[in-house]
Amino acid sequence: MRQWDEGAIESMHEVMNVGIHEVMNEGMHEAMSEGMNEGMLRTMEMPSDDLGKIHGSTCADAQPSINAISLRSAEARVEVSAKSEPKEQSLPRIAVFASGSGSNFQAIVDAAACGQRLKADIALLVCDKPQARVIERAKQAGVQTAIFEPKKYTSREDYEQDVLRLLHKQRIDWVVLAGYMRLVTPVLLRAYEGRMVNIHPSLLPAFPGMHAVRQALDYGVKVTGVTVHLVDEGMDTGPILAQQVVAILPNDTEDTLSARIQQAEHELYPQVVQNLLSAELLATS
Ligand code: GRF
């Protein structure tokens, strides 16, 4: 894409309709030109001193190069940043979906950085909030990012069809929801049945939904925790894979308790994902 002239970029904008924000990678461009909808906003290059660096990584050996391009169109934008050097072909490819701060995304990226704790390629971040902090984290880590604007679509299913096209194009094997603030429809669920997981800050089935930590405090329970579960159509209702207890201390506030819960999440989530991947490898070998 970097070599494209203005005319080529304009005609690409005509092909794309609504929902992605910025894109920074050639594979992504192909996905777009094969029917992605409204939304790539602009192209841009990563700063040259970002090339070859991985930021915030806990692995000293990780040296992927970063290549980033994005496009501008009138309606919406999609953003994708990319590691241009392919990783080991055999690693399962994970897409993380996130809407917010992305501390769990970071924990997963860090666990995968050396290929030790998590043997996977964190191949894509899907984000539905253009201002989310997780986007910056992905940029720093050199993880491709697709930013969607779901409200630009006529339905949730329509939005997910676009996401699904991208997941297929990027050969994504597993979907890991990490603070993704949307219910998933059968469009994605069917495609990733048994391969889509979520993390929730309570001991489900207690306190599902958005305010789990506050509700645990308000209710007066003495312990709460973290649940990792397979995703279904409900809100935090899928089959439970793992749980970790976090004690509630007498002086806990929502902030202090959330901090300890997140600490537990960052340990548990990469571990559970790795366990799932290992089982998958055994099952298919
Ligand atoms: C986490 O507490 C997770 O359990 C919930 O959303 C929060 C996301 O936090 N589903 P972060 O964006 O990973 O920091």
Image (tube, grey):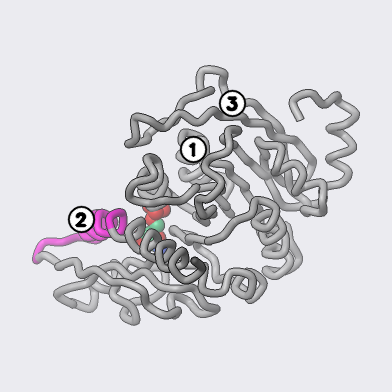
Residue picked out by circle 3 = 46
Disc 3: CA contacts within 10 A as few (<14), some (14-19) or many (>=20):
some
Q: Quadrant of residue 22?
A: top right
In the figure, 22 relative to 268: above or below? above
Q: Nearer the viewer, residue 225 or 57?
A: 57
Q: Which residues are magenta?
A: 250-267
Circle 3 or circle 2, nearest the eye: 3
Mark sitting on residue 256: 2
Pick out the residue farthest to the front. Answer: 285
Where is residue 140 drawn, in percent x and y? 47, 33
Q: Secondary structure at mark 2?
A: helix
* Residue type, numbered disc 1: Glu
Q: Nearer the viewer, mark 1 or mark 2?
A: 1
Residue 13, above or below 241: above
Q: Are the two marked residues, 1 and 3, in contact with CB atoms closer than 8 angstroms?
A: no
Q: Which mark is residue 79?
A: none
Q: Say which amino acid is labelled 2.
A: Thr
- The Cα–Cα distance between marks 1 and 2, rounded to whole angstroms, is 25 Å
Location of residue 145 in the rendering, given as x and y in whole percent from the top left corner: 58, 44
From the top left corner, tell me how far across and down residue 173 is, in percent: 56, 60
Quadrant for ligand 1 reads bottom left
Q: Residues within 10 Å of mark 1 (few under 14, many from 20)?
A: some
Q: Residues within 10 Å of mark 2 (few under 14, many from 20)?
A: few
- Dominant secondary structure of the magenta stretch? helix
Which residue shows up at 43% across the image and 75% down it? 236
- First in sequence, mark 1 or 2: give its number: 1
Dot 1 lies on which element? helix
Q: Is residue 177 visible?
A: yes
Determine the secondary structure under disc 3: loop
Give the residue at mark 1.
Answer: 136
Q: Residue at (74%, 66%) from the top-left corner?
A: 158
